[in-house]
Image (spheres, rainbow, N blue to C red):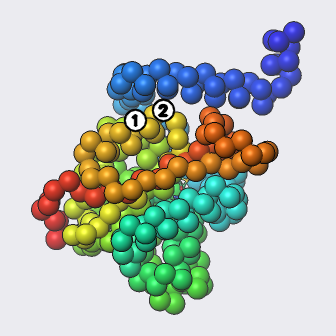
Amino acid sequence: MFGKAVKENPIMIISIQNKIRYWMRLVFYGIGAGFIAETIKRRNGNKQKHETADYWNAELSGRMSTPNLNGQISNAMRDQTSIVLLKMCGASTNSVLDVGCGFGDLVQALSNDGIERYVGVDLSDYVIERSNSEYANWPVAKHCNLSFHQADLREFSSPDNELFDVIVFNEVLKYVTVKEAVGQLKRYQRWLKPNGMFCVNITNDPKHRATFRALDDNFVWVYGMIYQQRPSGPRFRLTHNNATPPYQVGLFKPLHKYSQAA
Ligand SMILES: C[S@@+](CC[C@H](N)C(=O)[O-])C[C@H]1O[C@@H](n2cnc3c(N)ncnc32)[C@H](O)[C@@H]1O
C-alpha cells in the first residue's frame, strides 16, 4: 500500500529522497567525515550537473526565470538580511563583488544605499548576457558603475585586481565542497579592501553548517543570523523543510593582514 502511494505521488518520492539526503548529510558532516562525501562527489574528476553553465542556464531561463528567482520571500529576505547585517556591522557597501549574482537583484536592493561600484559574477552565460543587455535601464545604473562577468567562482579573478568593500556569496557556496569554500574565500581575500568583509548566506543544512564551522576556523567571525519563513502557522522552532528552509547568514573578515594583489 505504501509502495503504491509512493508510485502514484512523485512529490512524495522527492520528499523521501530529500529526507534521505538530509540524514546522510547529517551523518557525514555531523561526525566530521564530510570529506568522504566530498571525495565521492569529486571521484573521476566528474562535474556534478549543478556545476555546469548549461544546468544554470536552463534553471535561470526556466524555473527561476523572473528576477528575484520568482519573487520568493526567501530570496528578497536573503538580499535584505545581507544588507542589514553589513550595514549594522559597519561595512561600507560602496563597492560590492557579488559572486553567483544570478539576476543581480542584490545591486537593485542596494540602490538606495548609494552603491557606486558593483561587479556580478555568475557561471550562467544566460544570466550574464541578460544583465549586460538590461542594466543600463536599471535605476541603480544612474549612480553605480556595473559590470557582469561569466565565470566559475573557482576560476574568476578580479579584473585589474580591483578591490571591494564587500564580497558577497549569497546562496552559492552550497554548490562547492566545504574545502573549496574555505580555499576560495582565502583566494578572494586579496580583493577585499583593508576593512572589507565577506558575507556568506546559505540554507541551513548539515553540509552548510560544516561550511560555516570551517569558515569560522579560518576567518574572523563578525556576526550572523538565521531565519525561516512560517507560511502555515506560528511554529517558530527551526525545521528541516525543503520548500521553505532556514537560511543562515554570516559576516567574516580575514584573519590577518594579507598581501594584496594590487
Ligand atoms: C540560487 S542562485 C542565487 C542567486 C543570487 N546570489 C541570490 O541570492 O538570489 C545560485 C546562483 O549561483 C550561480 N552559480 C552556481 N555555481 C556557481 C559557480 N561555481 N560559480 C559561479 N556561479 C555559480 C548560479 O548560476 C546561480 O545564478
Which of the image's four quarters has the C terminus?
Answer: bottom left
Q: Kindly identify the residue that appears in the image at 42 percent across and 31 percent down.
A: 46
The answer to which quarter of the image holds residue 238 is: top right
* Alpha-carbon span between mark 2 and mark 1: 6 Å
Of 14 and 134, which appears nearest the observer? 14
Q: Secondary structure at mark 2?
A: helix
Q: Kindly identify the residue that appears in the image at 31 percent across and 71 percent down.
A: 164
Asked if marks 2 and 1 touch (Cβ < 8 Å), the reply is: yes
Q: Secondary structure at mark 1?
A: helix
Of 186 and 217, which appears nearest the observer? 217
Q: How many marks?
A: 2
Residue 210: image tag: 1
- In this view, 15 is above or below 173: above
Of 251 and 156, which appears nearest the observer? 251
x and y percentages locating residue 30 in the rendered image: 43, 25
**Which residue position is annotated with label 2?**
206
Which of the image's four quarters has the N terminus?
Answer: top right
Circle 2 packing at 10 Å, graded few (<14), some (14-19), many (20+), is some
The answer to which quarter of the image holds residue 8 is: top right
Residue 104 in sight: no
Circle 1 packing at 10 Å, graded few (<14), some (14-19), many (20+), is many
Q: Kindly identify the residue that appears in the image at 43 percent across and 69 percent down.
A: 88
Q: Amino acid at mark 1?
A: Ala
x and y percentages locating residue 203 in the rendered image: 54, 44
